[in-house]
Image (cartoon, grey):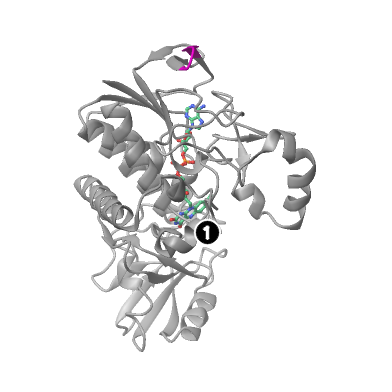
Amino acid sequence: MRVLVIGGGMAGFMAALAAVEHGARVSLISRAPGATALYAGGMEIAAGAREGRGLAAAQPFHPLVRLGLNEFELVSLLDEVCARLRAALDRVGLPVVGSWRQTGWFADVHGGVRPAHLVPETVFPGELTALQGKRVAVVGVSAVSEYDAVEVASALDEVGVRALPVTVGMDLPAGASLTDLFGRPAPIVNATADAVAFPPGLEGLPPNGFELLAAVPSPHGWRLQRALEAALEASRVGFVHGEVGGVRASGRRVEAVFTSSHELRADRFVLATGRFLGGGLVKERGVREPIFDLGVFYEGRRVDREWPLWLQHLERQSPVPAFRTGLLTDERLRPLDWDGVVAYENLHAAGSVLGGYDYARGFGVPVVTGWLAGRWAAIG
Ligand SMILES: Cc1cc2nc3c(=O)[nH]c(=O)nc-3n(C[C@H](O)[C@H](O)[C@H](O)COP(=O)(O)OP(=O)(O)OC[C@H]3O[C@@H](n4cnc5c(N)ncnc54)[C@H](O)[C@@H]3O)c2cc1C
């Protein structure tokens, strides 16, 4: 079975990995990094999934609800995908720690506190519950003005961590920003503390050091994106750099997709092109899916009819409606056309291109739907 995955973020990665493990010959095409490369450094996996039956009632178009799994199946699947993801990242030198069953709390570079289930090993010692009552030195770099260690330390204080800011000098270009720290060795910090919080991106932290979560652009996201690409290579997935612009189909079967210079044929396809940031959905006057012209829905209603008036009005009041807009699928993750019918029998969709959930809430949908889409694509 030849499987072509379109999209190189977390969903495309999981799809390619699953398809390879289920015996397919897999290629993946991606035009550029998407939302995955922007993640802050803490993977939220179980946002939504944990709510179980409540989720089905509150968000009937949520992709995990559309799968029609019972709670036992969903729990087993979450265990499986987290184990696969951790093993794959481990193999390429980006170990991640944690479990979807347990929520940890981590501080970011602006003193915000975020939940996460899986985090890089370099972030994990910064889990705030474990740091309660301990002394933490927060490292500020004098040349970097966009990040304020005093602000982070006082935010940590507010959540019960005894934090003190410590400023260090580093040899950096004039007007340096946080991104200039990426890949540089961590400076030596002379402070008596149980733990030392560093801005993200530095290498070679001391044994009691940890990285804060990032803002955009994110060193954690960049490392993750590079690790996913390395893991694909290690799994013998053929990587094609390019943008899919069109499709050749025969009836309800996709035969090939096109870039400006190539035709890529396969037996089955996985669409994992992300939402607005990735480019899987395009918002002009309305919202459309640019490759296959699939149906795009908001809470089960097609947005070509609704968007110009009703949804636009909702969006002005709150951005949330836009975040839930996306594709709908059947229970085998095959996307629907505008009339609500499976568009192509050999096309699956995964990740944040799917509607019905707020995609800023984590990697749960990309890892679960990516894995299933890849598995189903491989076994037909
Ligand atoms: C700013 C930001 C911060 C976030 N932080 C976190 C966080 O800290 N923790 C967390 O759990 N979640 C976070 N999220 C959510 C998480 O990043 C996303 O849910 C996840 O990355 C979506 O993965 P994806 O594979 O569906 O899409 P993407 O990662 O966007 O991947 C889409 C891919 O498809 C490719 N593509 C699109 N169109 C084409 C085409 N025509 N041809 C070829 N390739 C194409 C793109 O180039 C890209 O490679 C954050 C999201 C954002 C936007």
Toward the viewer: 106 or 267?
267
The image quadrant of residue 185 is bottom left
Which residue is located at x 25 percent, y 51 percent?
80
The residue indicated by pointer 1 is 57
Work out whether 343 lies above or below 329: above
**Residue 366 location (% of width, % of height):** 41, 45
The residue under label 1 is which amino acid type? Answer: Ala
**Residue 128 location (% of width, % of height):** 38, 77
Which residue is located at x 36 percent, y 49 percent?
69
Q: Name the chief secondary structure element in magenta.
A: strand
Looking at the rendered image, the quarter that the C terminus falls into is top left
**Residue 301 location (% of width, % of height):** 65, 41
Work out whether 101 lies above or below 302: below
Which residue is located at x 26 percent, y 54 percent?
76
- Please say whether residue 188 is visible from this viewpoint: no
**Residue 295 location (% of width, % of height):** 59, 31
Range shown magenta? 248-252
Work out whether 114 lies above or below 180: below
Looking at the rendered image, the quarter that the N terminus falls into is top left
Toward the viewer: 215 or 149?
215
Q: How many marks?
A: 1
Toward the viewer: 84 or 169?
84
Would residue 302 be found to the left or right of residue 359 on screen? right
